[in-house]
Image (cartoon, rainbow, N blue to C red):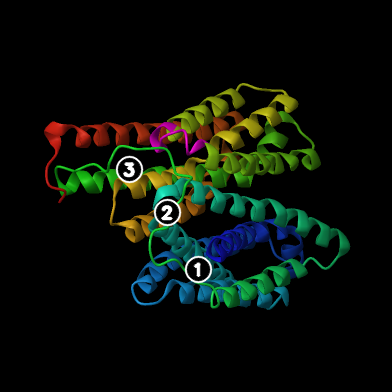
């Protein structure tokens, strides 16, 4: 199906843009003769662009055809990356990074909304494929960037992503988007029907819990992405070149874990899947605080990637299942919450890493997994009560 492949390509594009600045940061800063503080500012404005793109995409979906929004999003990424490849004055980098972030969040919001609306019977299966695509982009881009850096023309990484973005902008103008839910032989595992909330405040409270869980999870994932090699170097005494492989190990496991979602989602209910994944993640992070062996550390990182892999996509599907008829609202809010978590928590963890022993920092990561577990527990209690026959009132 052209729509499916175009969607996968868009998420792969989003994955490359999410990690590109980090992959070429040393060369980027050397070219502009500036510090990591400025590099952090560029990453921050890109994150703010991501947050700003979510409401813009949600508003645009009420007025425009999705193909046009996706073409515009891909064009925003393509043009910003092509201009960045020319290494413009530093003052121009900030608005370009903002535009790139807005394009990335808009395409994720629209594609995820379409999947939730049109692939109702296999939401988890399709979301897993989107997340695999994102992971492939995030895993493959640093490899490409590293090769270009070793050869010299590292700026071509920007140009390649830019041309890919413009190609996808054209592609969305010539393919058809399904207008009705698509039936399939392969379906997600059965779930209880959507709950009937006794009050509007209860309904909003459950939505707030899903937003909280998304904020915490993406903050945890982004923090691990940003500082995992540093944790190996400082905590386990691993040489920097070897420590860098910890990030690749984590993302390789994430991709493998996301590939398996399409199969496991046909067996496990969304809530059971989340219970298993979050509980295992908390256990692994707790074990990581106690290890002093580098080899065991890599084993734990791989296991952590496998356990965390399904959380975001299954959480997105579970939330949309809980609030039928609110697909675009729920998807937009979750995407915005993800952007906020990805922007705030790495900054906080970086501050902690400057002032606290590394073991305490790892305990903070484990605490985030524990907070995620508590969020799921709270949502489960409220949803179980809402589905109880004695509590079935009008859904206000």
* Residue 392 placement: quadrant: top left
Residue ID at (63%, 76%):
166
User: Could you say where residue 295 lies in the image, as x and y percent from the top left?
Assistant: 74, 26
Residue position for label 2: 183
Give the secondary structure at mark 1.
helix
Report the disc number at residue 35.
none
Give the secondary structure at mark 3.
helix
As drawn, the residue found furthest toward the front would be 185
The part of the chain drawn in magenta is 264-272
The answer to which of 237 and 1 lies nearer the viewer is 1
Drawn side of residue 161 relative to residue 362, left or right: right
Residue position for label 1: 102
> Does 300 lie within the magenta span?
no
The answer to which of 186 and 35 lies nearer the viewer is 186
Q: CA distance from mark 3 to mark 1?
A: 25 Å
Residue ID at (60%, 43%):
259
The answer to which of 17 and 354 lies nearer the viewer is 17
Residue position for label 3: 209
Depth check, mark 1 against mark 2: the one in front is 2
* Residue 329 placement: quadrant: bottom left
Residue 354 seen from this side: no
User: Could you say where residue 312 lies in the image, as x and y percent from the top left?
Assistant: 48, 45
């Amino acid at each position: 199906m052209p729509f499916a492949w175009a969607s996968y390509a868009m998420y792969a594009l989003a994955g490359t843009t999410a990690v590109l600045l980090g992959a070429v940061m040393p060369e980027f800063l050397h070219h502009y003769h500036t510090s990591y503080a400025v590099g952090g500012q560029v990453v921050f404005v890109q994150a703010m662009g991501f947050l700003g793109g979510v409401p813009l995409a949600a508003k645009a979906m009420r007025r425009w055809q999705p193909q046009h929004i996706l073409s515009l999003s891909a064009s925003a990424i393509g043009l910003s990356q092509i201009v960045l490849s020319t290494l413009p004055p530093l003052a121009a980098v900030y608005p370009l990074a903002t535009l790139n972030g807005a394009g990335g969040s808009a395409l994720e919001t629209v594609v995820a909304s379409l999947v939730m609306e049109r692939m109702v019977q296999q939401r988890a299966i399709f979301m897993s494929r989107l997340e695999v695509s994102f992971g492939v982009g995030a895993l493959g881009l640093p490899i490409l960037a590293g090769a270009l850096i070793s050869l010299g023309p590292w700026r071509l990484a920007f140009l390649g992503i830019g041309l890919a973005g413009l190609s996808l902008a054209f592609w969305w103008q010539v393919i058809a988007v399904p207008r009705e839910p698509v039936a399939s032989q392969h379906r997600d595992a059965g779930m209880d029907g959507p709950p009937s909330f006794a009050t509007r405040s209860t309904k909003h409270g459950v939505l707030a819990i899903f937003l909280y869980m998304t904020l915490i999870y993406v903050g945890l994932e982004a923090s691990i992405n940003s500082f995992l090699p540093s944790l190996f170097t400082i905590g386990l005494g691993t040489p920097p070149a070897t420590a860098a492989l910890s990030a690749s190990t984590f993302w390789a496991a994430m991709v493998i874990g996301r590939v398996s979602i399409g199969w496991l989602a046909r067996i496990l209910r969304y809530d059971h899947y989340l219970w298993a994944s979050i509980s295992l993640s908390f256990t692994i992070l707790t074990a990581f605080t106690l290890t002093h062996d580098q080899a065991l550390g890599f084993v734990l990182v791989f296991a952590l990637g496998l356990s965390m892999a399904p959380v975001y996509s299954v959480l997105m599907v579970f939330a949309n299942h809980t609030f039928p008829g609110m697909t675009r609202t729920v998807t937009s809010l979750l995407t915005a919450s993800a952007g906020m978590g990805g922007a705030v928590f790495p900054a906080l963890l970086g501050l902690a890493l400057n002032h606290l022993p590394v073991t305490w920092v790892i305990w903070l990561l484990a605490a985030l997994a524990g907070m995620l577990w508590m969020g799921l527990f709270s949502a489960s209690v409220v949803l179980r009560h809402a589905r109880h026959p004695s509590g079935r009132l009008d859904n206000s």
